Image: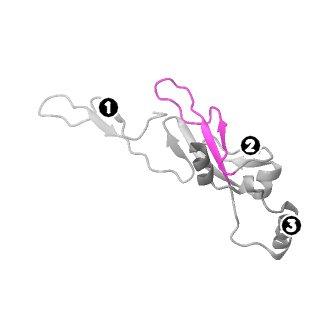
């Protein structure tokens, strides 16, 4: 049935072995679900990761996102940080008991290419000159912030 999860058991009445001259017994089937290449399941919620470019994260964009019912277009707002999670309501797994659909969570991450063309390198170097260095406040490490919190 829709929404069944790993480890749950189905009882099929009268589908088991027959004992002597009696009626057939019940057959119990335990469900095993293999991991999916794109989606991770958490009860009725689905999670997937979608790569975006630095430009898409900075400027905003529309990206194609896989769902169980097919791909859809999702808006990425300007200034989206890597790791930002978006919720797609009703795009998750059906709850076996209530029939309600869970949500799909889309986690974006900024893809960093292993190599770039000469033109891309030139443009990135130009952008780097324009951006300048981060201020001391922007470049503090996570641990410095934690230490400051406890002081």
Query: Which residue: 65% across, 37% down?
Result: 87
| Residue at figure coordinates x 76%, y 57% from the top left | 54
Res 18 quadrant in image: top left
Instruction: Estimate the x, y position of residue 66 in percent, counting from the top left.
Output: 65, 47
Horizontally, is 149 left or right of 81 in the view? left
Residue at left offset 52%, top offset 46%: 40
| Nearest to the observer: residue 71 or residue 41 | 41
Residue found at the far left of this picture: 20
Residue 11 is marked as 1
Residue 7 in the image: x percent, y percent? 36, 40
Mark 1: secondary structure: strand
> Mark 2 highlights which residue?
74
Task: Provide the residue span drawn in magenta.
Answer: 82-109
Marks 3 and 2 sit apart, C-alpha to C-alpha, by 32 Å
Can you give x and y, in whole percent of width and height, for residue 104 in the image?
Answer: 61, 39
Name the residue beneath numbered marker 3. 129
- Left or right of 148? Residue 34 is left
Above or below, comparing residue 5 to residue 130 in the picture: above
Q: Magenta region, mostly helix, strand or loop?
A: loop
Q: Nearer the viewer, mark 2 or mark 1?
A: 2
Count of marks placed on residues: 3
In the picture, the disc for residue 59 is none
């Amino acid at each position: 049935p829709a929404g069944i999860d790993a480890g749950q058991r189905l009882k099929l009445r009268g589908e088991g072995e027959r004992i002597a001259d009696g009626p057939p017994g019940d057959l119990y089937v335990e469900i095993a679900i293999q991991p999916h290449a794109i989606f991770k399941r958490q009860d009725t919620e689905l999670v997937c990761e979608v790569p975006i470019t630095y430009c898409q994260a900075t400027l905003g964009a529309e990206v194609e996102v896989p769902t169980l019912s097919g791909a859809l277009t999702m808006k990425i707002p300007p200034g989206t940080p890597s790791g930002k999670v978006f919720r797609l309501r009703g795009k998750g797994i059906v709850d076996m008991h209530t029939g309600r659909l869970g949500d799909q969570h889309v986690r974006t991450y900024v893809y960093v290419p292993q190599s770039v063309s000469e033109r891309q390198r030139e443009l990135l170097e130009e952008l780097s000159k324009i951006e300048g260095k981060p201020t001391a406040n922007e470049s503090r490490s996570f641990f410095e912030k934690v230490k400051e919190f406890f002081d």
